Image (cartoon, rainbow, N blue to C red):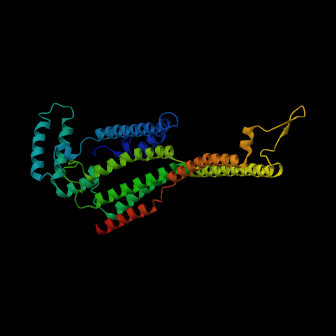
Amino acid sequence: MSDQGDAGSDDFSGLTGFFFYAFIVHPITAWILRPGRFERKKSIMYAIAFLAALAAIKTGLEMQQRGPNYYGLLDVTRSSSPLEIKRAYKKLSLQLHPDKNPSPDASDQFDRVKQAHDVLMDMEFREVYNKFGAEGIKANKRFNESQFLLEAAIYYVSYGMMAFMLTLGKSSGDARNWIFTGLIAMLVVEVVVMTSQTNPFPTWLMPQTTEYDFIWLLKSLFPAFLNGCRSLGAFLYVDMDAQTRKLLLALQEQNKDILLVLRDIQIGVQTVQTHGVAGGGPRLAADGTTVAAAPSAVSRATPTGKLKELQDRLQTSNSNVANAVQSLQSDGGGKSNMGFYLMILGYIVVSYVFN
C-alpha cells in the first residue's frame, strides 16, 4: 500500500466511510434482519455475508487506489537486506527508465521507484516509513510517546462517543459492549505494534506489510464492524423486562386457576355434607318432576374430580411458567464486561510501561 495520495481525498476513508456505513449500509442490513423476512439463522448469515463482502470490496478499492507500498513497489520484503533492495532497484530502474519505458508517466514511475530505494536503503528513514508511511517521511516525523498517545486518545475517544450515540437505548446494550470491546482490542494492537522496536509480525506473515499499513487496515475495517454490531445487537436483543412480565403473568394465571378450583372443591364438599350427593343432589325439571343429576356431571363435581382438574390445570400452567423461566434464564445469563475491560486496560498500561 502506498501513501502517495492525500488521505483526506479518499472518499471512503475516515468519517466518510463511517457515515457511508451508518446511513446506507446499516438500513440495508436492518432490512435483511427484519423479523419474518428470513429464518433467524439465515438472516444472521446473510447479514454477516453482506457486511463481509461489502467491507472486502470497499477495502480492496481503497488498497487499489493507494497502490503498493515501497516494499511492494520494489518487490522486496521487510526483512530484505540493503543488497537485495539495491539489486531490485537496479532491475526496475532499467525497466522503468524514461529512455526505455514508453509509458506516458514513465518519469513518475521512475521517480517513485527511486524514492522507494532511497527510503529503504536508509535504516532511519526505513524505520520512520514502517511506522508512519510516506507522509511521515515528508514531515520528518519521529516516534514520540506523548504525541502518539494524544493522537490515539483523540481517535478512540471520538469513535467511542459516536458509537455511544449510535447505540443509545436498551436494545443496543449488547452492541455497545461489542463495539467498545472491539475498540479496546484495536487500541491494544496499535499500542503493541507502534511501541515495538521491530515489526511484531513474523516475516512469513504479510511480508510486505508495514506497521502503518496494518493499523490503517484495522481502522478501515472498523466502521463495518461497528455497524455490523449495531444491526446484529438490535436483532438478537431480548427484552428482559418483557420476559419478567411474561413470567409474572403466567404465575398470576396459575394462581387464579388454583383459587377457582379450590373454590369449586369447597362448594362440592359443602354440598356433599349437606345433601349427601356431590353436585347439589337431584334437580327440578321444567314440569316439576325430580330428575337425578347426570353421572358425568356428578363425577366432575366430586372433590376427587376437582382435584384431578386442578392437577391438569397446574400441569398446563407449570409448563407456561417453566418456558418463561427458561427464556428468562437464557437471556439473563450475560455478565458484566467490566472485569474484561479492566483486564485489557491493565494490559495496555503494563505493555506501555515495559516498552
Q: Which residue appears at 34% of the width and 37% of the height?
A: 57
Residue 52 vertical position relative to residue 213 in the rendered view, above or below? above
| Image height of 107 relative to 256, above or below | above
Total of numbered circles in the picture?
0
Q: Is residue 160 visible?
A: yes
Q: Tell which of 338 and 76 is nearer to you.
A: 338
Residue 193 position within the rendered picture, expressed as x and y whole percent measured from the top left: 29, 57
Question: Percent from the top left, x then y, of residue 129?
Answer: 24, 53
Q: Quadrant of residue 184?
A: bottom left
Q: Does any portion of residue 169 appear in the rendered image?
A: no
Considering the image in quadrants, where does the C terminus appear? bottom left
Say whether residue 229 is left or right of residue 248: left
Q: Residue furthest right?
A: 288
Q: Position of residue 18 (x, y in %)?
A: 43, 44
Viewer-closest of 175 and 40: 40
User: Is 245 placed above or below 65 here?
Assistant: below
Q: Nearer the viewer, residue 299 or 334?
A: 299
At horizontal 12% and vertical 36% (from top left) the residue drawn is 95
Quadrant showing the N terminus: top left
Q: Place residue 186 in its image quadrant.
A: bottom left
In the visual, does 314 lie left or right of 162?
right
- At x 68%, y 52%, the residue is 255
Q: Position of residue 257 (x, y in %)?
A: 69, 48
